[in-house]
Image: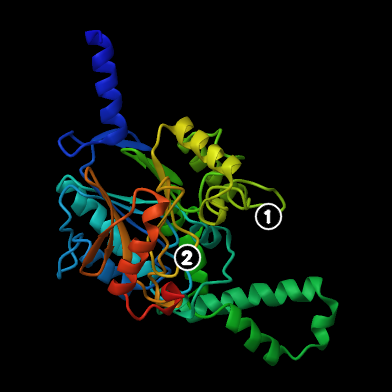
Amino acid sequence: MKASLFIMVLFSALLVNGPADAKAKKVDDYHWTGVERVVAIGDLHGDYGQYIKVMESAGLIGKNGKWSGGKTHLVQTGDITDRGDDSRKIIDHLVKLKKQANKKGGYVHLLIGNHETMNVIGDLRYVAPGEFKAFTTRNSARLQEMQWERQREWMQANVPEFAEMDKVAYRQEWEKQVPLGWVEHRQAWSLNGDYGKWVKGNQVAIQVNDTIFLHGGISEKYCKFSLQSLTDQVIEAMEINDPTIVSAMNDPLGPVWYRGLAEKDETDEVYSQTLDNILKRYGARRIVIGHTPTGGVVWPRFDQRVVANDTGIATHYGAHKGVLELTAEGATAIYGDKRIPLPVDNSGREDYLLAVIQADSNNGHLKQ
């Protein structure tokens, strides 16, 4: 082999595999190479207590809540928000951890999930009462009253039957939808608010070493786009905020909603080849996703070309413990104080699943 060709092959191997002895390098906002250890954590859905438990189990924080992960890269794949009461508390803690990690040579990547986009655009179907309460201040009653006056004026101008309605009963129902803290929540989650800006500053998808991370997945429809383009499209759609337009933000095939990588038949040879083509297009070995709950297991699919990593950490989904670790030695699932290597192909999944059940003996879903 000619010397120049040898150097090119070696450089390519470093880019893809990122061995432990290669120095971590940020290629751009969407690509990192040479990272020694990556920990991926799936959907958290507002459960601060469970979040702290899995962060401790992965060695990312100490009992004082501060970063202890050294040069580890943490990738949280979206859906911090909704269903639980403490999304704000989790986000604020992660923002602090990001600064602490940077000082230690580590990194915290926070990706955009469908529930983050929903909060930005005002789709509040899954916002728990405690989320609004977290935004209350001494001015909340006054702000709620101002919002009510706007609502009353709009109803008078646009709904003729409002004049005959029971105003007391109507307001009581309205306040269930617009509780104290609602106005402040909406201000903070607008694209000009603190949390809206935070979402806008995050990525939809990144690649660390040989692995792509994102919330939903990459479908055939969107695989032609770069990781940056996927992010740009979702942010643009949030800015436009028109539900009648099918976009990367709301498309079932889009990167924050797609479930195909978690649900497609693994014996489908055509889809398997499509997956190969997608990985080849991005120069990756695997894709790690959240979004689709697994019922408690870090689950490798398609011979570990896909890892479904929404284990259901939040109490709403069972309070499970699984997170994914990637190092030069391979992929490992962390379940509390148990560490179980992921099988490199589908033939090893039964033994792996039995080991997971041993680590989580109360999980009836996995036993079934």
Relative image position of residue 362 (x, y in whole percent): 35, 81
Residue appearing at x 59%, y 83% in the figure: 175
Q: How is the image coloured?
A: rainbow
Dot 2 corresponds to which residue?
Answer: 293
**Circle 1: residue type:** Pro
**Circle 2: residue type:** Pro
Give the total of numbered labels. 2
Quadrant location of residue 323? bottom left
Residue appearing at x 67%, y 52% in the figure: 242
Secondary element under disc 2, as helix, strand or loop, is loop
- In the rendered image, the vertical position of residue 274 relative to residue 108, given as above or below: above
Q: Quadrant of the N terminus?
A: top left
Relative image position of residue 342 (x, y in whole percent): 32, 55
Relative image position of residue 235 (x, y in whole percent): 52, 46
Camera-side residue: 354 or 277?
354
Locate residue 90 relative to residue 257 in the image: left or right.
left
Direction top: furthest residue: 2
- In the rendered image, the vertical position of residue 21 relative to residue 73, given as above or below: above
Residue appearing at x 30%, y 75% in the figure: 49
Callout 2: 10 Å neighbours few (<14), some, many (20+)? some
Of label 2 and label 1, which has the lower sequence position? Answer: 1
Callout 1: 10 Å neighbours few (<14), some, many (20+)? few
Residue 170 is at least partly visible in this image: yes
Residue 243 tag number: 1
How far separated are the C-alphas under marks 2 and 1?
Answer: 26 Å
Relative image position of residue 279 (x, y in whole percent): 46, 36
